[in-house]
Amino acid sequence: MSAAGALPQDRDGILALLADWVAAGWLRSLDRAFAAFLAREAPATEPLPLLLAAIASQHQGRGHVCLDLEALAEDPDATLGLAPPVAEVAEPLRPAACLGGHDAGALAAALGGAPVVAGSDHPTAPLVLEPPRLYLRRYRDAEARVAEGIAARLATGRARRAAVDPAALARWLEWLFGSPPTAATDWQRVACALVAGGDFGVITGGPGTGKTTTVVRLLAILQGLALEAPEGRALRIALAAPTGKAAARLNRSVAGAVAALALPGDALGAAVRDAVPTRVTTLHRLLGSQPGSRRFRHDARHPLALDVLVVDEASMVDLELMDATLAALPAQARLVLLGDRDQLASVEAGAVLGELCARARAGAYSRETADWLVAAGAGHLPPQTLAAPAQALDQQVVMLRHSHRFPAEGGIGRLAAAVNAGDAAGAEAVLDSGAEGLARLRVADGADGMAGLESLATDAVAGYGQYLARLRAADPGDTATPDACDAWAHEVLRAHAGFQLLAALRAGPWGVEALNVRIAGALEAAGAIAPRGVWYEGRPVMVTRNDYGLGLMNGDLGIALRRPEQDEAGHWRRVLRVAFPAADSERGVRWVLPSRLDAVDTVFAMTVHKAQGSEFRHACLVLPERTAPVLTRELVYTAITRAAERFTLAEAAPGGLRAAIGRSVRRCSGLEARLRGG
Ligand SMILES: Nc1ncnc2c1ncn2[C@@H]1O[C@H](COP(=O)(O)OP(=O)(O)OP(=O)(O)O)[C@@H](O)[C@H]1O
C-alpha cells in the first residue's frame, strides 16, 4: 500500500495508488482499468487527469452522470462515498490527502489541456469537461441529446398551446372533472390542461395521488379534441413502463380508470372511450430490444408510429433509456412522464425525473400559464406557485399532492410525508404512535443467529404463509386443464403480493442473502415449504437479467409450482414449472422450466431497489445494524410507499432510521442546468 503523502507524480505511481484503492474497495477494477487504458493510449497524460478519470468512472458506476469538481474539491472522500477512516485499520492514501489543496478551478485547469479531455484538436477524447462537471463522453452525449429532445418539445409546445381552443378544453375538463373548483386548486385538472396544451409533460406525485386516473382522463381529452376536430382521427397512443411488473400493475389500474371515465353519452363519448388504450407494454418491448445488443429496433431512423407516448414509473428510467426513448419518438409526438420524484432513482446513471421535477413542489408557473389555465377551465393556481422570471420546463411539470388511497392522517401517509421532509423525529413519533397500519420491531443477531429474529420470522411466516396456503387451497388437482392451471398460478401470484420483506443491502446479516436463508428456514420449520435442492414448490424468484429468448425481464417475479401435465402416453404427472404473469395481459401466465432460468434470485427478501414498481399489502423493511451510504431517505420512502395497507420497520440497531432519513441522495448531472440554460 502507498504510504501517506501527496499525489504520486508519475503514471506508474498513480496506477499503483489506484490498484490500492481497488484493493480497499474504493474503486472498481473497471475504474482503474479505464485510467490504465487512457495512460496507454495517451502517454503524455499527467497523473492528476488519470486519477480524475478513474474517479469519474467510479462516480458513473454509482449512478451519477458526471463528476462535480466542486463537490470533489470540497470533500474528496465523501464524493467517492468513503466511510470515515477507522484508526487501527491500515489503508491507502485517501482521496482527500491526494487532492488536498486543489480547488475546483485547479482541477479543471489540470484537465483543460489533457489529451484525454475533449478539446479543439481532439474533439472525440473519452472525457468531456464542462466546468464544474467532468463527464465520460458517452453520458455527456446522452445527456445533451435528452436535454435537446425535451427542449425541442418545450419549444414546439408553445404552438400547441396556441392551437388548443380553451373553450373546447374547458368542456372536456367539465365532463371529466365536473364544474371548475372555486377554492382549492385541483392539481389533477391542472395537469390535464397543462399537458393537453403542450408537447411535453411531467406528472409527479406520491402513491395513490391519482397519476393513473389523471393520465387516463388526459388521454380521453386528447382523443376528444382530436376526434372532434374537422377531419379528425384518433391519436396513436402507447402506454409503457420500465419493468414488466410496473407494466402489469398499470395494466390493472388503467382498465378500471378507463371504465370509470365520465364521458358524454353520445357516439363521440363512446368513440373517445374506445380510443383510450388499456394495454401497457414495457419500454424495452415498445422500443424493440434486440438480443445481444444495446441498440433498439426503433430509433431516429425507424421511429415509433405514435402521436403520444406515456411512460409510467419514470423515476426508474435512467438517462440512456430516456435517450433511446426520445430518439425513437417522432418530433411531433407528445411525451408524458409519470412517476414519484421522491423515490429512489434508477440503478443505472441518471435521475431524469427527479431533475425535471426539481421545482415541482414549490411550483414556478408564469402569469401567462396561470391565465391560460383559467381560460381553459382548469381553475386558479395558488399565488405562491407563480414565479418570475418563469422557465419553460416548469410550465409543463405538475405535482399531485393529495393521496386518494391513503388518508393524509393515516399512518403510512404521515410516515411517508415525514421521511420525505427529512423529519426524523416526526417519523419516529408517527411510528411509535400506534397508528393503524404501522409497526416497529427491534431485531438483533443473537448467539444462535436466530435469537431476536423471532418476531421478524413470525411476521414473515405469517405473511408468506398466505400465498403458500393459497397454493395448496387453490390447487386445481392432478388432471387440471391449462386454463385451470393458469387461474391457480394467478391466484398464488396475487396472494404473494400480500407480504414482502425488504432489505437495504445484499450482504451482511440483515442483507437479502442472509434473510432469504433465514426466512426459508423458518418457513420450512413451520411446514410451509419443503425444499429439496434449489428448486421446490413455492419458491418465489425474481429475474435478475433480461432474457429476450424467454421474454422475461429483469425484475419479473415468478413462483415455482408443481403443475399437472400429460405426457405423450396420456399419463398425468406433476412437473415443477415457474409461473410468471404474462407481461402484456391481465390473466395470462408464462410457465418456464426451472432449468432454463439461469439468472434468478430467491425473493423471500428483496432489495428496495428491486421492489420499485411493485406494491404489497404489507411491506416490512429491515435496516441493518451498521449504517451505509446506500441507506438514504429515498430508500426508506420507497420502501414505505411499497406498502398498501401495513408497513413494519425492523431495525437491527437503534438510530438506523434516523441516520437514513438524514442522508439524501443527490445524483450529479447537468440535465437541469442544460434545460435551464445554466
Ligand atoms: N380525483 C379523485 N377523486 C376520487 N378518487 C380518486 C381521484 N383520483 C384518484 N382517485 C382514486 O384513488 C386511487 C388511486 O388513484 P391512482 O391509481 O390513479 O393513483 P396513482 O398515483 O396512479 O397510484 P400509484 O402510482 O400509487 O399506483 C384510485 O382508487 C382512484 O380511483
Image (cartoon, rainbow, N blue to C red):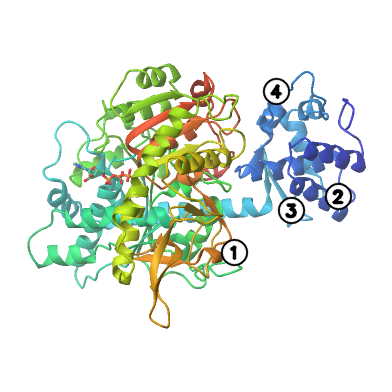
Rendered image: mark on residue 39: 2
Q: Amino acid at mark 2?
A: Ala
- Tell me the distance, in whole angstroms, between the alpha carbons under discs 3 and 4: 32 Å
Q: Amino acid at mark 4?
A: Pro
- Residue 198 visible in the shown view: no
Packing grade of label 3 (10 A; few <14, some 14-19, many >=20) is some
Q: State whether residue 320 is above or below residue 407.
A: below
Q: Is residue 99 toward the left or the right of residue 436 in the image?
A: right
Q: Nearer the viewer, residue 91 or 526?
A: 526
Q: Amino acid at mark 1?
A: Arg
Q: Which residue is mark 1?
A: 294
Residue sitting at x 59%, y 64%: 294
Image depth: mark 3 or mark 2 in front: 2
The mark that comes first in sequence, 2 or 1, is 2
Q: Nearer the viewer, residue 29 or 577?
A: 577
The x, y position of residue 229, in whole percent, is 20, 66
Q: Which residue is mark 3?
A: 126
